[in-house]
Amino acid sequence: MDPPNEEFPKRENERPDQWTLAWWNEQFAEVLKGYRGASHAVNRAIADYADTGATVQELQQRCDALNREATTDRAQLGKLQAELTTLRDRVNRIAEFLNKFRDEQKKGGGKDA
């Protein structure tokens, strides 16, 4: 074996044979395919991430709008419940009046009849 100071210049001047170059070209082509696939996957993931972000923003806006509508609806329900309580009290007073009136009619024997 030659000493290193002679070996390096020899190897530097040698060129790989055609089969070695063909093998290197195949290896490079495979690496290039892998890079293209990875690049495509990364770009697709970035696009999906952006789409998902837009969808999340849209859904957040819809949720906010629904919360505002729910607050308005709850206020309307409170108003209707208050009206219902008023009407229930009124119906109870009418029923009480009619019961007293009927009882008085039974006691009095129906003066108007």
Image: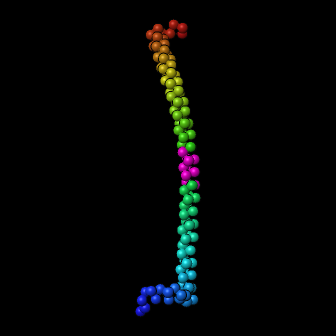
Extent of the magenta region: 51-60
Residue 84 visible in the picture? no
Residue 9 horizontal/vertical position (percent): 50, 86
Q: Is residue 25 left or right of residue 7?
A: right
Q: Residue furthest top?
A: 111
Residue 46 horizontal/vertical position (percent): 55, 59
Residue 27 horizontal/vertical position (percent): 53, 80
Among the 4 quarters of the image, the one containing residue 36? bottom right
Towards the viewer: 106 or 56: 56
Residue at 54%, 49% in the rendered image: 56
Towards the viewer: 101 or 31: 31
Residue at 51%, 85% in the rendered image: 12
Asked if the magenta segment contains residue 8, the reply would be no
28, above or below 92, in the image: below
Towards the viewer: 16 or 58: 16
Name the chief secondary structure element in magenta: helix
Residue at 52%, 24% in the rendered image: 83
93, above or below 5, in the image: above
49, above or below 76, in the image: below
